[in-house]
Amino acid sequence: MRRRVIFPNKVLPYLLLTPQLIITVVFFYWPAVQAVYYSVLLQDPFGLRTTFVWLENFQTILTDPLYLGSVEVTIVFSTAVAALAMGVALLFAVMADMKIRGKHVYRTLLMWPYAVAPAVAASLWLFIFHPEIGFLGRWLNEIGIRWDYKLNGDQALLLVVLAASWKQVSYNFLFFLAGLQAIPKSVVEAASMDAGPGRTFWSIIFPLLSPTTFFLLVVNVVYAFFDTFGVIHAITGGGPAKATETLIYKVYVDGVMNLDLGGSSAQSVILMAVVITLTAVQFRFIERKVHY
């Protein structure tokens, strides 16, 4: 007979869920509804009057070359951040899971960057790669490499990718390490008797990590689309020449700096739809290859 948990107080479960439901409604559903509402409105330059324009804001955005340029930047940026952050985290997790001296110290140190705020993480990378005060930035110029991310768009994009990836490595590391520790040691030892370390990892360990990898893939894509605003804002401000202006940063530029409330709201609706679609596609097609 299957045993079920029964709450004697029927009101208690709803009271426990109420704080989370309030936070979800206030910080997700309400802003989402507001964005959809303002996306079909057009304000006058003084913000005194609004006009219902149907889908005109969306039509203007999707035909704007600057917006299409931000789409290309976002695709390159999010792909690079997800791949770099997950790849480095997996490498660190495999090394930290080995029987080496002081591995607990390594694990603790690798977790610390996750506690650093995005703006602080960006400042740390500025002290490294700034062309005038950064030790690596000055060293690159001294050896003949013209390094100035404030003028070179490719260098600026590379710098924000490195900073955003470094911020996310610790999060990925925690899950990869937990996944590695959950794999039975007997399975790994049996496989190592018939194959080398490389083949054991790719044939046995990595497939067993597929649920963790799939989860982190979804999380890192969402992170690259939304949570990297602070890093970009602190390092490059979307420049130079919009080389690092991702979709989330363009929403800020058009809405806060250019005061285009309708256009920025339409952009946020499009961005939300894109992320939901990507997540659905990942669950629909990539999850088929995940082994639980």
Image (spheres, rainbow, N blue to C red):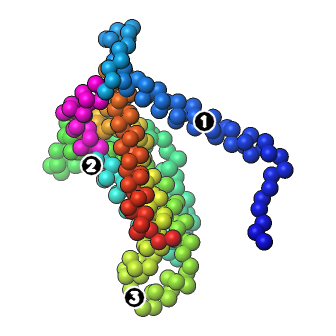
Residue shown at 36% from the left, 18% from the top: 52
Residue ID for mark 2: 76
Instruction: Name the one closer to the observer, 245 or 170.
Output: 245
Distance in Å between CA atoms under marks 3 and 1: 51 Å
Instruction: Indicate the position of residue 236 as horizontal and vertical percent values.
Output: 30, 35
Tell me if I can see residue 174 in this picture: yes
Q: Nearer the viewer, mark 2 or mark 1?
A: 1
* Majority secondary structure of magenta residues: helix
On screen, residue 196 above or below 97: below
Q: Place residue 54 in its image quadrant.
A: top left
Residue shown at 58% from the left, 34% from the top: 25
Instruction: Name the one closer to the observer, 283 or 141.
Output: 283
15 sits to left or right of 226 = right
Counting residues from the start of the chain, the first of labels 2 and 3 encountered is 2
Tell me if I can see residue 255 in this picture: no
64 sits to left or right of 130 = left
Circle 1: residue type: Ile
Look at the image and say whether residue 59 sits in the magenta stretch. Answer: yes
The reply to whether discs 2 and 3 touch (Cβ–Cβ < 8 Å) is no
Distance in Å between CA atoms under marks 2 and 1: 33 Å
Circle 2: residue type: Val
Look at the image and say whether residue 173 sits in the magenta stretch. Answer: no
Q: Check disc 3: other Cα within 10 Å, few if <14, some if 14-19, many if 20+.
A: few
Residue ID for mark 3: 195
For the record, the magenta segment spans: 56-74
Residue shown at 40% from the left, 39% from the top: 272
277 sits to left or right of 109 = left
Q: Nearer the viewer, mark 3 or mark 1?
A: 1
Residue ID for mark 1: 23
